[in-house]
Image (cartoon, helix red, strand yellow):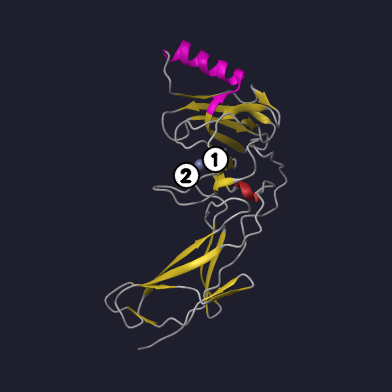
Amino acid sequence: MKGFWLFLCLSVVSFVVKGQDSIYLWPTNSGKFLSSTFGETRSAHFHAGLDIKTWGREGYKVFASRDGYLSKLIITNQGYGKAIYLKHFDGTYTVYAHLQRFNSEFQAIADSIRINELDYSYTFEQSFEEKKLMVKQGDVIGYTGSTGIGPPHLHFEIRNSFNQPINPLSSNLAVQDTISPVFSSFLIEPLNINSKVFNSYYPSEIKPISVKNDTTYFDTVFVSGDIGLSANVYDQANQVNNKYAVYDLKLRSNNRHLYHEKINYFDFS
Ligand SMILES: [Zn+2]
């Protein structure tokens, strides 16, 4: 059997990047802890923002992350629930979802539209004129909740001027994270009738043999034919037990780059 060995190198860049001029304020007073990060895979989409923990409770303050103005309010039974879209003066947006309620000014606007224009409809979506309803960074715009989808948390997004969600942790926003990602195993799978892994037609799960200086080492793997690799890898942050998608994942073979995943933004379409 023709064999070769693969060297897998897991990049240990956690989700901290710098480089934007815009200064964002952490959007709630519930603490800087996440239950989900940007770009994690969901049933039919990528996760478009950060899920900020609210410890099973509702009613934490939600702050305008930057100066700007109200762009849109929505209330839906599913998805984002009660959500606020702010637009900022550089054309970017921030989105705050699953709110328990809006602040009294926005709530009055929402109620007036629902009662006067929508025959008391609970659900609605309303966009607003540019630069009419201004907000300052730090203004309380609403309160955290669990509308749309529970459990309670704040879903927070930053979108660029093309309405593409970008990784909020590529702004000045950050969580404390000194813990390297964990590469717990990978699965090697024969992809067709001519492929074998360790002379077998069945997939093989490979565990690490050691971890040194943030590098995870695996033993020699013998394969022939076309094979697929699945990585079982996650990241963690300080003081919480949540498992997150890794920010930056690379695969190299004999100094060749085979795969690189790093999600800083994506397109909804
Ligand atoms: Zn979310």
> For this rendering, which residue is in front, 162 or 166?
166
Q: How crowded is mark 2: few (under 14 residues within 10 Å), some or many (20 or more)?
A: few
Question: Chief secondary structure of the magenta span?
Answer: helix
Relative to 231, say whether 99 is above or below: above
Determine whether, in the image, residue 43 is placed left or right of residue 50: left
- How dense is the environment of label 1, judged by Cα within 10 Å: few (below 14), some, or many (20 and up)? some
Q: Earlier in the sequence, mark 2 or mark 1?
A: 1
Residue at 41% x, 12% y: name it: 119
| Quadrant, the C terminus | top left
Q: Quadrant of residue 149?
A: top left
Contact (CB < 8 A) between labels 2 and 1? yes
x%, y% of residue 31? Answer: 64, 40
**Residue 12, position as x, y percentages in the image:** 61, 65
Q: Is 204 on the left-hand or right-hand side of 112?
A: left
Q: Position of residue 109 (x, y in %)?
A: 56, 17
How many badges with numbers are in the image? 2
Per the image, is 104 magenta? yes
Q: Is residue 115 above or below residue 31?
A: above
| Labelled disc at residue 268 | 2
Name the kind of residue labelled 2 in the image: Phe
- Quickly name the residue at label 1: 163
Q: State which region is magenta.
A: 100-119
Residue 162 belongs to magenta span: no
Which residue shows up at 32% across the image and 78% down it? 195
Disc 2 on helix, strand or loop? Answer: loop
| Whether residue 188 is situated above or below residue 133 in the rendered picture | below
Residue at (44% x, 28% y) in the render: 76
